[in-house]
Amino acid sequence: MSIEDVQKHSVHTLVFRSLKRTHDMFLSDQGNAPMKFDESEKLKRQIKVQDEFGPVKEAAKREVRSKQMQQVGGVGEAHNGTVQGDSDHMRNAYDLERSDPSSRALVAVNIGQQQMLVPKKAPTMPKPNWHPPWKLYRVISGHTGWVRCLAVEPGNEWFCSGAADRVIKIWDLATGTLKLTLTGHVSTVRGLAVSARQPYLFSCGEDKMVKCWDLEQNKAIRHYHGHLSACYALDLHPTIDVLVTCGRDATVRIWDIRTKACVHTMAGHSNTVAEVKCQSADPQVISGSHDCTVRLWDLAMGRTRVTLTNHKKSVRALALHPVQYSFASGSPDNIKQWKFPDGTFLQNLSGHNAIVNSLACNSDGVLVSAADNGSMHFWDWKTGYNFQRVQALAQPGSIHSEAGIFSLCFDHSGSRLITGEADKTIKIYKEDETATEETHPINWRPDIYRKKKY
């Protein structure tokens, strides 16, 4: 192209001509359809069929095969053909599930007289119930050692505490004032329980002693001898007059309250039994041990019904749900929820990452866990949602490491939470009355719920 041509035409015209030449150059290629490859088309269809119909593509063949087997079975079984057909349908679905792992995402659904395999929806985590946050409102001082155990009286008027200073103190629940001090143990008091049927308080300690205190005379009236080492926890049976204790001798012992006789010495744990709980329905005794197991005991026979071995670290805490037929166990690896009577695993509550010393649950479905590092987590029982975390502060004069919480206890209304701590104090928490769902919303997203491995 000469210089005169460039000067003759505008830039717009030159650009347009260039575009036209480019278009003409590639037009011949655009007009031709791409070559058809039979192999690639076949492969594409196979992949699509496998993707959409893979789980059920063999089901029709199995159905035909099962019908042939029924025909071979003879005329003699014709009268119960309907029942046989239904059972074959169920067996085919079961065989399919066993033989093809991908079909486990299917569920059998009856539609009229026929049965279909339909995809199973991924379960979504239900929305947790809203709970108001808890706040500290009272700190009680008086013990001169670590506060190791707590118990609330059935009338909900007072509570008692046992500590490493070897004394049991009884406090007014409403005012927090000291009412009584009981002395008699010669080592740390580790367990307390108040009877609902008699005016008795039961205590146990690291001195191997289990004592029954008469609260009308304010003195020990019975001693239960038998533990070979420190006694770590006790609980009263709600309907029978028996006392259950456990300790460092790896046994759970059942005592008749009146006669002081040891009814059962239930052996099976291979290490210290740290916690024991009683309930009126079977299994009536539940124990957690440093051998990383939880055992459900047959009280009548005095032997183990079920051993739960899911925990990887020592189990120091148990909590029974006051309404539901379930319980929780606490360990440094996880807090696990279980269903009675067979100890069916429900779910993990993860996130503590510390030695869990105590668990408590109230009828509103609030589960509280307390750890050795002073952390306290509040969980929604149904969903396992952790709605609040509290870090206990050691009292002035205590060293930083004395922030551990050893014991948790709800009062009988479930509205006050009492904690016994390593800084020698007792702290009482209550729900924040000013909180609403707007001021403290649930930070929750409906993700697909994946059951954690245990």
Image (cartoon, helix red, strand yellow):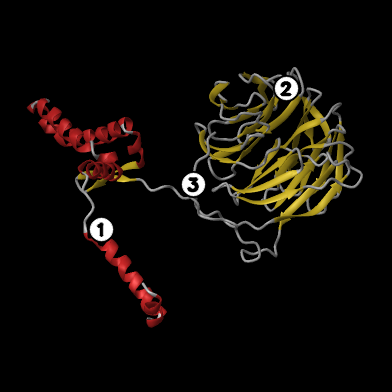
Q: Residue at x 60, y 26 (%)?
A: 293
Q: What x and y, as percent, mark residue 442? A: 60, 58
Front-most of 120 and 425? Answer: 120
For disc 2, the neighbor class at 10 Å (few under 14, some 14 to 19, many from 20) is many
Q: Disc 2 or disc 3, which is closer to the eye?
A: 3
Q: Earlier in the sequence, mark 1 or mark 2?
A: 1
N-terminal of the pair, mark 2 or mark 3, is: 2
User: Residue 449, labelled with which disc?
Assistant: 3
Residue 14 horizontal/vertical position (percent): 37, 75
Question: Foreground: 349 or 381?
Answer: 349
Q: Residues within 10 Å of mark 1 (few under 14, many from 20)?
A: few
Label 3 and label 1: CA atoms lie apart by 52 Å
Q: Residue 29 carries which label?
A: 1
Q: Quadrant of the C terminus?
A: top right
> Residue 113 in the image: x percent, y percent?
19, 45
Q: In which quarter of the image is the N terminus?
A: bottom left
Res 284 visible: yes
SS for callout 1: helix
